[in-house]
Image (spheres, grey):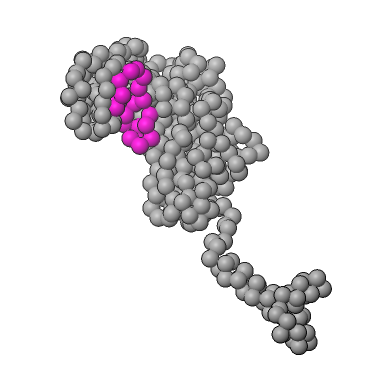
Amino acid sequence: MLLFQTVFERFPRGLKSQRNVDWRALALSRRSRLALWLLVFAGFAAPAMAASCSLSNFRASPGLPSTLYVRGSIPSGEPFFSTNVTVDFNCTANSGQAIRFGAPFNSTPQLVAPNTVATNAGSPLGARASSITVISGACTGSYHPKPYIRFNANSTCLGSATFGITFGASGGQPSGTLPLALPTQFPGTYPNSWANANLCNADCTGNVGFALASLNAPSTVAIQTLANTCALSTNSLTIALPKVSTATFPSIGTIAAKTRAALSVSCPTAAAAVGLSMYVIFTPQSNPSGSSGGAIMSTTGTATGVGITLYDRSGNVITSGTPVRLTTSIAATTYDATISAAYVQTATTVTAGDVQASGTYFLSYY
């Protein structure tokens, strides 16, 4: 009544004869217009979608062998196998959300089999590079340090994600099997699996959701002990790169001062590893740049705009954690595992200073 009376009194005196106006009809008409405007505005708002994801096409490089062979009396913390896992994803989320991919554990070594641990992000045992490829959808790939996609609009995003897993000894002789589903570090949040996708905040610095999807390995991997194995010529290798001028680096990607270091592997006649394939694997001590796919090691020191890259004996770039095959059938002989290191320009401007990088190398048999 107050609304109707107020409106009525605003009419000029000459319209007093209009007191018989059906104010209820007028109010209804206004409500109708209001409803119409609400419908119009609602038509321009993008509907919110529940985040969802599916993973498929598990593959590992190198592929998972049926049996891994570990040298006897292996010290705790020493790696014995490393692989890059790639999965395809089909994910839907809202603008500003992100979805992260990786194994169900972080940099803390996770027990996955008797006396066997695994890591996949940022630790000395398993520091690995990530890579992500977006095929379609309004999303952008990034790393922290696991690969993730950030949605720029409500969208469905398709692509593939790659991350590394390194296995090592933990307080005893590894045995048993690597299961189809690796044990999760976060029970109740992520399921056991080799790969999962989980919702996180916009830059994936923390979790705000739960696991959206998971994927297991196609087969288990047995672990056996080798009584006698081959031996590296040295357990500690230093490559001293020479001093160079900053003028040596005119553009991103420039390689300079490549320096070789001798490394060999000897296999005695009595080695139980004879007949197996043998690989040497290099992993950096700190997580490599995701954008380089693990080809450029993270560095310390005062120089900026420059990194370090490793090369195998044939001059091929060594990607973090990717095995370099020495032979497909070990014989009683010595194998050349020579490597080289070089500076690589990573930014438009290079500033003077020192630069260092460190890592771990080990032999793997399967």
Q: Dividing the image into 4 quarters, which one contains the C terminus?
A: top left
Q: Is residue 94 left or right of residue 239?
A: right
Is residue 291 magenta-colored? Answer: yes
- In this view, the residue in front, 288 or 282, is 288
Pick whichever, 327 or 257, lies toward us: 257
Point 21% across, 22% down: residue = 246
Quarter holding residue 18: bottom right
Q: Position of residue 95 (x, y in %)?
A: 51, 52
Q: Is residue 302 above or below residue 176?
A: above
Which residue shows up at 69% across the image and 74% down it?
Answer: 31
* Camera-nearest residue between 325 and 240: 240
Judged by its main secondary structure, the magenta piece is: loop
Residue 320 is at least partly visible in this image: yes
Judge left or right: residue 196 versus residue 262: right
Q: Which residues are magenta?
A: 288-308
How far across and how far down the image is residue 208, in percent? 60, 41
The residue nearer to you, when weighing 366 against 216, is 216
Marks counted in the figure total 0
Residue at 47%, 46% (x, y): give it.
Answer: 150
Residue 309 seen:
no
Residue 4, horizontal then vertical, whole percent: 77, 75
Q: Residue at the spot x=56%, y=52% of the render? A: 51
